[in-house]
Image: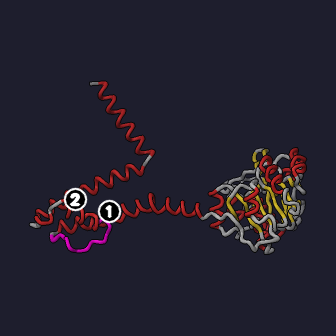
Amino acid sequence: MFTSGRKRVGFITGVRKALRRHPHIAYKIAAMLLFVIYVLTFEYLMILENQPENANLITAIYWATTTVATVGYGDVVFTSLAGRLFTIIVQVLGIILISGFLVTYIVTPWMDRVIKFRLPRRVSSGMKDHIIICGYNQLVETLIDELTEQDMLFVVVEDEEELIRELVYKNIPCIFGSPSDKQTLKNAGIEKAKLLIANKSDERNANIVLTAREFQHINIIAIVEDRSNSKYLKYAGADTVVSPKSMFGQFIGKKAMDRLVSRVTGATEVFEGIHIVEFPVYLKSPLIGKTLKEISSQQLTGAKIVGTWKSGTLSFDPKEEDIVRENSVLLAVGTREELSKLKKLTH
């Protein structure tokens, strides 16, 4: 008896775990049980209302489906107060059940498939003299803002579906595909492009540069994470190798600006019109307590925070929800106007 009891408990536990892992199964079981209750209750109430001709399984299923779907044709109705109250409950629960089921298990998966199928994979044939950006991050986000202001054509190449969906939502020109694949670069219009920026990991950048170098006319800029890999990217065919970490390191051990000077000083230009500056946050700065997302908003500064100093350690992966503390040091990228706004707020 004890053994059978343990087996029963084990079976129930297993069922519970399965239902937690697959909540849609529990949803379907609950819906089926509820539908059975509707059918049985319908037959019972029809007998109470002296409508025996409707107290059968087919009519019960017909009434339940039309009522749950809220299309009720009105040919089978209750006349008693209890029957009408039961009808209202079935209709309300039907709206909840159908909308929840349709949205969660039919509409959303269908939209995901449609969006995935429609991921942009090729630029328009008329696009030329544009910039191909292989890889998207905060540094590229700032570059894109600048390119947009100057009406320069560009396209982002990414192989992460979620990121492409986000870019499409933001109306940022992009295509889905591997940046190191020759056909993907052709789809990005590399034959008519004037510049390619490789902005993935050093290893992937090497493959991107090697592939892009087959097109002799293109100018290639590679963003390197480890400065020691610069020579290999040069060997691969990169015309220019940029090391943001090296640029950031130029600011270590020195102040980025003078308290008494309002203009931005100590800025390093990464691309034309875009600079990198280190900003120490002074005591009583209005930025203290704000998140990095709030600081980067157009309403406040527009500058992008691409790095932070925390406990003597430089982090290049700041989160939007990170909060600025006293004596924080922010590594910001933006135009001189955006950086000037940020500088004023750090004091």
Secondary structure of the residue carrying tag 2 is helix
Q: Which mark is residue 93?
A: 1
Secondary structure of the residue carrying tag 1 is helix
Q: Position of residue 291 (x, y in %)?
A: 67, 58
Q: Nearer the viewer, residue 284 or 202?
A: 202
Reply above or below: 247 against 186: above
Residue at 76% x, 44% y: name it. 311
Disc nearest the viewer among 1 and 2: 2
Q: Is residue 70 magenta?
A: yes
Residue named by callout 2: 39
Image quadrant assignment for residue 159: bottom right
Q: Is residue 65 left or right of residue 80?
A: right
Q: Nearer the viewer, residue 83 or 205?
A: 205
Q: Is residue 72 magenta?
A: yes
Q: Nearer the viewer, residue 305 or 193?
A: 193
CB-based contact (under 8 Å), mark 1 and mark 2: no
* The N terminus: image quadrant: top left
The disc labelled 1 sits on which kind of residue? Leu
Residue at 74% x, 64% y: name it. 188
Residue at 32% x, 62% y: name it. 93
The disc labelled 2 sits on which kind of residue? Val
Residue span colored magenta: 67-79
Q: Is residue 258 visible?
A: no
Q: CA distance from mark 1 to mark 2?
A: 14 Å
